[in-house]
Image (cartoon, grey):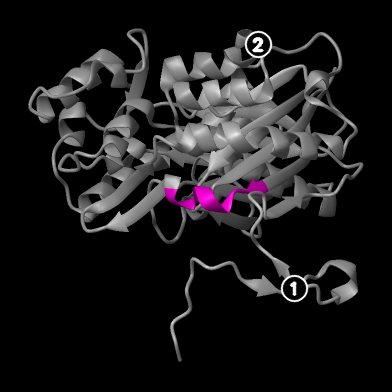
């Protein structure tokens, strides 16, 4: 049998219209759109928890170390900002040395376990939720690959019941945190008397490849930081931000611009310089269509909770949505203080949001490999 050409669009029967065969072609730049339907049950963000490694390193120190590694050849324009810092799980000297994948996995487990537990325990504490009420734990991480996933260890350590359902998410990258909120909301619509714990832990510094002299690897070293974030969702009637609807939009031609490849020596980052251009081109249409399902437009949003993927990514978000410079203040603040912590970053931004004095509406936005645009509509209930 001839090997199929995976680059050609595939005609397939549409399931729309009770199974009518329409021969729809997947060629649209937003070919797949999935959104959880509008429902009365919403997911209250009862508690947010974050955790960071103790080593806080100025971005200037990281830049100088990378410059020395590359023999003094490093463009100053690659540096994010003089006042930026990153939290690193391992000493910078260790990160800049070659390591086997076994070494990297050992380091990931050594640091990820504690960070995930700390963030999760803080989210549960701030929510005031009994551990026995948690029916689902969603663990998110794309920077380490272990079986069983970390949630299997967290269940007994946090005092959760042995019947707690587990949902590990690995391949959604930076978009995994927002996507996990969506899957948590889906669960609450089916089991409104239970609670959901979402935990994201990312250690991208441990994936750094010192022999990789690509711009992707360089930018990743300056943009990413390590840490963990968590959220406790329930369907109670208390005050706070609530997840009301989520969605995902796939941009197929963006697949080669963002992600990881598992190669000899470990994970190699893909972070294309064309990524911000793709976001600028497609984000507005995706957001407009998503908001229209609730009869909303961008002007109805009080807050934008954008994943701070980097300065150019934030500029692309602002430009595509026509936002004033101060609309992304919380995202920019988080990027300055901790950088891009991949899927965990959205929890840092949510934690930095000021509490409104009255009802408010917000949109969470993150980007993952695919290229996927992950969206969540949030409403604040005083």
Q: Kindly identify which residue carries mark 1.
A: 23
Q: Residue at x 80, y 70 (%)?
A: 15
**Which segment did they paint magenta?**
249-256
Instruction: Find numbered disc 1 in the image and state the secondary structure of the residue it sits on.
Output: loop
Q: Are marks 2 and 1 in contact (CB under 8 Å)?
A: no
x and y, in percent, of residue 17 in the image: 89, 69
Q: Residues within 10 Å of mark 1 (few under 14, many from 20)?
A: few
Q: Is residue 81 above or below residue 111?
A: above
Q: Is residue 324 above or below residue 207?
A: above
Q: Residue at x 49, y 45 (%)?
A: 173
Left/right placement of residue 215 relative to residue 160 reads: left
148 or 279, which is in the foreground? 279
Residue, far left: 71
Does the stretch in magenta take in 369?
no
x and y, in percent, of residue 275 in the image: 47, 37
| Residue 38 sits in quarter | top right
Look at the image and tell me in which quarter the N terminus lies.
bottom left
Q: Kindly identify which residue carries mark 2.
A: 324
């Amino acid at each position: 049998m001839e090997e199929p050409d995976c680059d050609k669009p595939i005609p397939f029967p549409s399931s729309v219209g009770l199974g009518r065969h329409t021969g729809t072609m997947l060629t649209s730049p937003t070919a797949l759109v999935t959104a959880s339907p509008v429902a009365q049950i919403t997911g209250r963000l009862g508690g947010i928890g974050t955790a960071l490694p103790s080593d806080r390193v100025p971005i200037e120190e990281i830049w100088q170390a990378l410059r020395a590694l590359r023999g003094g050849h490093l463009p100053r324009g690659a540096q994010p900002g003089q006042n930026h810092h990153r939290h690193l799980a391992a000493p910078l000297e260790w990160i800049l040395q070659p390591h086997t994948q076994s070494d990297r996995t050992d380091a990931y487990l050594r640091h990820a376990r504690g960070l995930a537990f700390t963030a999760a325990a803080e989210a549960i504490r701030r929510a005031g939720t009994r551990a026995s009420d948690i029916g689902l734990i969603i663990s998110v991480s794309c920077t380490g690959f272990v079986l069983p996933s970390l949630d299997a260890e967290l269940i007994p350590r946090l005092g959760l019941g042995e019947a707690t359902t587990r949902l590990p998410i690995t391949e959604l990258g930076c978009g995994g945190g927002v996507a996990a909120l969506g899957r948590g909301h889906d669960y609450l619509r089916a089991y409104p008397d239970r609670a959901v714990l979402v935990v994201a832990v990312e250690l991208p510094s441990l994936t750094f490849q010192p022999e990789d002299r690509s711009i992707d690897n360089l930018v990743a070293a300056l943009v990413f930081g390590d840490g963990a974030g968590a959220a406790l969702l329930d369907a109670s009637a208390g005050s706070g931000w609530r997840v009301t609807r989520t969605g995902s939009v796939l941009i197929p031609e963006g697949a080669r611009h963002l992600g990881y490849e598992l190669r000899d020596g470990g994970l190699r980052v893909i972070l294309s310089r064309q990524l911000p251009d793709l976001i600028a081109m497609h984000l507005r249409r995706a957001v407009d269509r998503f908001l229209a399902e609730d009869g909303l437009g961008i002007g109805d949003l009080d807050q934008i909770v954008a994943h701070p993927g980097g300065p150019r990514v934030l500029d692309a978000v602002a430009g595509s949505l026509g936002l004033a410079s101060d609309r992304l203040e919380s995202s920019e603040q988080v990027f300055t203080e901790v950088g891009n912590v991949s899927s965990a970053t959205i929890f840092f931004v949510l934690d930095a949001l000021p509490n409104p004095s009255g009802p408010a509406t917000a949109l969470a936005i993150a980007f993952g490999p695919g290229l996927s645009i992950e969206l969540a509509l949030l409403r604040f209930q005083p």
